[in-house]
């Protein structure tokens, strides 16, 4: 059983068959659930339907009677009116109007005259029976299931393309030759894509409606949006990743204060023996609070022999000589604007090889690829300060051709944390 879940035992055809079986199973479960738990949807009366209601109200005008006879006659008149309204609604919606909704309407419309009843029905959402779950808590499950279906359809499409490619290492995680190491990424999509789709739907509903969180009134567009979120789960992750900079911005106060103090310390030390001319503000304040002031007479007594006086210079703190470096890959403008640019960006840069070579050495340092799906940031830690050359190699395969991308850029590492943006261009064909 343990060997069954290991990616290395799978073949391209075997994994494709497994994905198809999973999709069939999810589809069967989907239909069984919808057959057992009927869904409902919101419907609002259109202008033609409201005009027909005016005809009904005209046939049952409001009764003006005396106080003694008002109650019975008005009630009988409104009951007849409401009965005809309900027959009209059932006819318009193929007898699919929810019985609870009709019961609530009957009790409410009995207390309203024709004008108020028309105004109420104009804005009222009629609950009708539907195959899909568009109201209530089951709407959450509807989003999750359609997003999962979108993920499975997407994986089946890309794996089927990978199985028909020539056995060449194209480097594209989606449409290159099948690689069993991609299975873990594909399985993870089945879990995070439905959750991300649900979060986006709830966020949209919260920002655009005052109704309950479980009352999502998007309609059948909900199914299309959830499916697209599953099919293009990589772009959904990129959208959420960019959203974090807006919702959770990183403050620069810590880094700025950390780089200010060492500069002041170096300037003070470089002046030589007299360290009181340009002291660091924080250091001066601390010294004033902790060191007692020596009277002038005592100070003169200490330096009786000037030739033996030695200036006391504080030892400088050891300077930082290593850095954490991030190389962020992106497409050059010419590549991004080409016909293959959007597809390359969608596939991501996980399969790229990013290397650093010091200017004074032949050593090759390979950067760590991103762990997030379809990321573009390669990292290395504890890199000594100095000049380096960044070399990037990457291949992307579309349906018919292989596009080789590369970059070569000189950088200087002189800060504790640095990020370099490296644009990728198409490698010219030689020979």
Image (cartoon, rainbow, N blue to C red):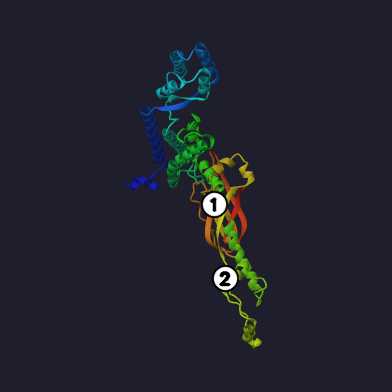
Q: Is residue 316 visible?
A: no
Q: First in sequence, mark 1 or 2: give its number.
A: 2
Indicate the quadrant where residue 152 lies: top left
Position of 258 relative to 165 (above/below) = below
What secondary structure is found at the residue carrying circle 2? loop
44 and 244: which is toward the camera: 44
Q: Is residue 57 visible?
A: yes
Task: Please tell me whether mark 1 or mark 2 is closer to you in this view.
Answer: 2
Q: Is residue 111 left or right of residue 304?
A: left
Q: Residues within 10 Å of mark 1 (few under 14, many from 20)?
A: many
What secondary structure is found at the residue carrying circle 1? strand
Residue 82 location (% of width, % of height): 45, 16
Indicate the quadrant where residue 258 lies: bottom right
Residue 188 location (% of width, % of height): 43, 44
Cβ atoms at labels 1 and 2 below 8 Å apart:
no
Q: Which mark is residue 44?
A: none
* Number of numbered discs: 2
The residue tagged 1 is 377
Residue 33 location (% of width, % of height): 37, 31
The residue that appears at 49% across and 37% down in the rendered structure is 201
Q: Residues within 10 Å of mark 2 (few under 14, many from 20)?
A: few
The residue that appears at 61% across and 70% down in the rendered structure is 284
The residue tagged 2 is 317
């Amino acid at each position: 059983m343990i060997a069954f879940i290991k990616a290395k035992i799978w073949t391209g055809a075997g994994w494709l068959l497994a994905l198809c079986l999973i999709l069939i199973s999810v589809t069967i479960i989907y239909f069984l659930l919808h057959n057992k738990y009927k869904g409902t949807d919101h419907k609002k009366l259109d202008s033609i339907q409201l005009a027909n209601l005016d005809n009904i109200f005209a046939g049952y005008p409001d009764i003006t009677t005396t106080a003694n006879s008002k109650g019975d006659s008005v009630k009988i008149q409104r009951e007849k009116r409401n009965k005809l309204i309900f027959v009209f609604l059932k006819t318009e919606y193929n007898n699919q109007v929810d019985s609870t909704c009709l019961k609530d309407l009957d009790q409410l419309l009995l207390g309203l005259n024709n004008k108020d009843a028309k105004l109420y029905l104009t804005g009222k959402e009629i609950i009708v029976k539907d195959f899909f779950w568009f109201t209530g808590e089951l709407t959450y499950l509807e989003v999750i299931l359609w997003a999962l279906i979108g993920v499975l359809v997407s994986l089946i499409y890309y794996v089927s393309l990978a199985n028909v490619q020539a056995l060449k290492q194209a480097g594209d995680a989606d449409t290159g030759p099948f690689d069993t190491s991609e299975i873990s990424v594909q399985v993870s999509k089945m879990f995070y894509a439905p959750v991300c789709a649900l979060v986006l739907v709830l966020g949209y509903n919260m920002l655009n409606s005052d109704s309950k969180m479980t009352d999502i009134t998007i309609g059948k567009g909900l199914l299309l949006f959830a499916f697209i979120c599953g099919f293009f789960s990589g772009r959904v992750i990129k959208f959420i990743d960019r959203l974090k900079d807006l919702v959770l911005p990183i403050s620069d106060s810590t880094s700025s204060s950390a780089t200010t103090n060492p500069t002041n310390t170096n300037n003070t030390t470089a002046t030589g023996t007299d360290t009181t001319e340009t002291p660091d503000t924080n250091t001066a304040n601390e010294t004033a609070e902790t060191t007692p002031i020596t009277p002038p007479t005592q100070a003169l007594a200490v330096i009786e022999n000037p030739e033996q006086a030695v200036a006391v210079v504080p030892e400088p703190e050891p300077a930082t000589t290593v850095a954490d470096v991030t190389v962020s890959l992106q497409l050059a403008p010419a590549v991004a604007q080409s016909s293959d640019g959007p597809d390359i960006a969608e596939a991501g840069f996980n399969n790229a090889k990013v290397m650093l070579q010091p200017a004074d050495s032949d050593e090759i340092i390979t950067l760590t690829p991103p762990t997030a799906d379809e990321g573009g940031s390669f990292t290395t830690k504890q890199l000594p300060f100095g000049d380096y050359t960044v070399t990037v190699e990457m291949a992307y395969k579309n349906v018919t051709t292989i596009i080789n991308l590369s970059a070569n850029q000189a950088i200087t590492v002189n800060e504790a944390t640095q990020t370099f943006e490296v644009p990728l261009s198409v490698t010219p064909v030689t020979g």
